[in-house]
Image (spheres, rainbow, N blue to C red):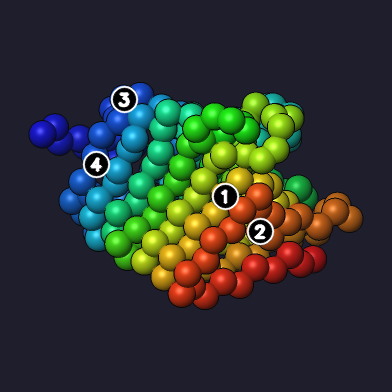
Amino acid sequence: TTTYATVGEALEAVAASGGTVNLLVDEATVDSLSLTIAGDVVIKGTGTIDVTVKNEDNVEDEVNKNTSVFTIQNTGSLTLDGVKMVVNGVPNEGQGSDGTAFTLYGKAGDVGSEVIVQNGGELWIQNINKGFIMGVPAGVPAPSTAKVTVKNGVLNASGIDGNFSNGGEFVFDHATVDIVAGVDQVSEWVGHALSVHKLTATASQITATATK
């Protein structure tokens, strides 16, 4: 067992090959994160992790809007087992918020990457440009095999400028889901609250709204 000074260091240590991070504190903060996960990463505990997307100065707005907190490759997954994670964007004056919470790999015919929330875990995504980009590289044939599973857990999204999701598979099992997207006041375009290729819901409460 290796003990790390910060959650950020622990996540970086297991991102490439996978592993379990045991959260030993009630609250942890990770600033300026943009992490690529290639293995199966599990975060276990009962505390809260507050994460903010990495933001660069002196770059095109589109760069920061598309920067993901977590990019999960085909071979990878991220599981929140009992923990609460809050994923935050960065305010962009006059342009809503910057950042994308998750970019998941998964083109048709291949195994897709996955985000799993289970055993009382919670995933909160707030004040960010996009929630999930489901299936990369861009323009891959539908349907995407990227997947989000919430089992005995919570998925909450608010303040999403554009799309919360753009395809992929979502599984809600005894889950509480509340999504508000398309809040961008700058453009005329309204984003998708919950756009999927496949949705399976069992004994779950789901609310999804796209609004101006």
Query: Local crowd at mark 3 within 10 Å, few (<14), some, or many (≥20)?
Result: few
Front position among marks 2 and 4: 2
Q: Earlier in the sequence, mark 3 or mark 2?
A: 3
Q: Residue at x 46, y 42 (%)?
A: 114
What is the spatial separation of the Cα atoms under label 1 and label 3, in whole angstroms? 24 Å
Q: Which residue is mark 2?
A: 194
Secondary structure category for the residue under label 1: strand
Q: Residues within 10 Å of mark 2 (few under 14, many from 20)?
A: many
The numbered disc on residue 21 is 4
Does residue 108 appear to the left or right of 70 in the view shown?
right
Nearest to the eye among marks 1 and 3: give it.
1
* Element under disc 4: strand
Q: Which dot marks residue 169?
A: 1
SS at mark 2 in the image: loop
Three-letter amino acid code of the residue under disc 3: Ser
Q: Quick check: can you spot residue 84?
A: no
Give the numbered dot on residue 209.
none
Query: Given the image, on which type of amino acid does mark 4 rest?
Result: Val
| Of the image marks 2 and 1, the number of the one nearer the N terminus | 1
Q: Are marks 2 and 4 in contact (CB under 8 Å)?
A: no
Mark 4 neighbour density, 10 Å: few (under 14) some (14–19) many (20 or more): many
Q: Are marks 4 and 1 in contact (CB under 8 Å)?
A: no
Which of pointers 1 and 3 lies earlier in the amino acid sequence? 3
Nearest to the eye among marks 2 and 1: give it. 1
Residue most toward the front?
A: 109
Disc 2/disc 1 C-alpha distance (Å): 11 Å
Instruction: Name the amino acid, label 2.
Output: Leu
Please name the amino acid that badge 1 sits on.
Answer: Glu
Residue 17: mark: 3
Q: Earlier in the sequence, mark 4 or mark 1?
A: 4
